[in-house]
Image: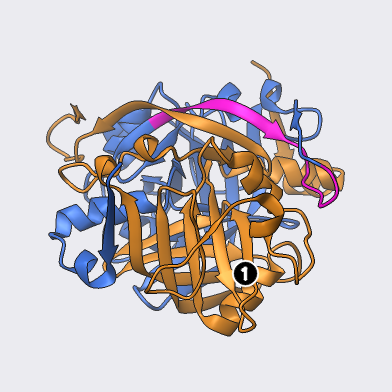
Chain colours: A blue, B orange
Amino acid sequence: MSIKHYTREEILEMPKDFRRNFINCLSGYKPVCLCGTINLERQTNLAIISNVLHVGAHPPLIGILLRPHVVERHTVENIDQVGYFTLNNVSEDYYKAAHQTSARYPREESEFKATGLNEFFGERVPAPYVKEASLKMGFRIRERVKITTNATIFMVGQLEEVFLPEEAIGKDGFLFLEKMGSIVSSGLDRYHRADPIARLSYAKTDRPIKEIE
Amino acid sequence: MSIKHYTREEILEMPKDFRRNFINCLSGYKPVCLCGTINLERQTNLAIISNVLHVGAHPPLIGILLRPHVVERHTVENIDQVGYFTLNNVSEDYYKAAHQTSARYPREESEFKATGLNEFFGERVPAPYVKEASLKMGFRIRERVKITTNATIFMVGQLEEVFLPEEAIGKDGFLFLEKMGSIVSSGLDRYHRADPIARLSYAKTDRPIKEIE
């Protein structure tokens, strides 16, 4: 196996499209969600995102990193106007429709209509859920952090409600994502199923870890 | 399929361990990396992390979210002292050793020695790489952002160098993570292989997407 080494300077000299693929893959496998938002004129927006991060369990917080000057502009504007967003899991059944939401639709055209995915509204958040998604999470904005290095926005959402299939919930609260049909992404455009290897016990310094159910 | 609905209030009333599993799984599948650091006394540290986020391709930036008061305290202290960290992919060959790094080893005991993983030092960053990892990335701290809601730290690293197998690099810069043996995690303790579904073409509003190589 031949090992390649690239320095920062060599990476900066890569052709732009090559570098974009290369760097987008480096961070590894990613979750893939549909982010639903709405503006004050009640126009909805749906965007596929993979920059989703667990921030904390108490209080329950998830963060999403958005690029306000390009693809995710409408999402950022809607969240800034209304203060809420939803995250919906992507399954193999509609991953192509989910991917299609990344096309540059004009402001007045909802990605829901354009891709055939359906809106669902809950009672806790004004933003739309994706009806087809088995996992639906509604968030209120808790913190908006600007990453000054490249002018991206890290939106920290406080979980307001969640809908999910009961059969995916384990006895200890663990969620078996494959029972919800959730898939994985890599780079900007590749999708994968996840095939379980094992769950491992809590690591202690004085005993070996073992596989658990 | 029976759908469960939980409100924020119901989630806050879950038993603590149940809620921790539940919320840690909600954000979906995650990358899994080993983060290598060193302090000014040249004591090394190695921590398994899944809170890894692509921040930007130009300049190449990856962020990691760390909890300074608990498990990742040594990692945060070392990065604050020295200003560098490494990220190394985790493969099925050593994922148990990687998981074991999450045990609470004392300051003076390196997780490298404790788990049998080996240090490798490059020329660009002072922090140690994991010799066994096929993907090794070295970062200099570019920005340190505090998430005030729960006192976590989002460390944005600027990529200084990367080592990876040449065969994993596609013609357009896309990285085939399975050729590097990279795996996926969910929740706090479950690991998965990723099984490719497809790569999809760049989405346009006026034409259907198709599968690409």
Residue A102 visible in the picture:
no
| Chain of the residue displaying label 1 | B
Q: Is residue B195 above or below residue A106?
A: above
Q: Is residue A194 magenta?
A: yes
Residue A121 picture quarter: top right
Query: What is the three-letter code of the residue carrying label 1?
Result: Thr
The foreground one among B69 and A55 is B69
What kind of element bears circle 1?
Answer: strand
Q: Is residue B73 magenta?
A: no
In this view of the protein, can residue B162 be seen by the observer? Answer: yes
Residue B152 placement (x, y as % from top left): 65, 69
The span shown in magenta is A192-207
Pick whichever, B53 or B38, lies toward us.
B38
Residue A101, given in percent of the width and then of the height, sits at 30, 40
User: Does residue A153 appear left or right of residue B34 in this picture?
Assistant: left
Residue for point 73% across, 48% down: B8
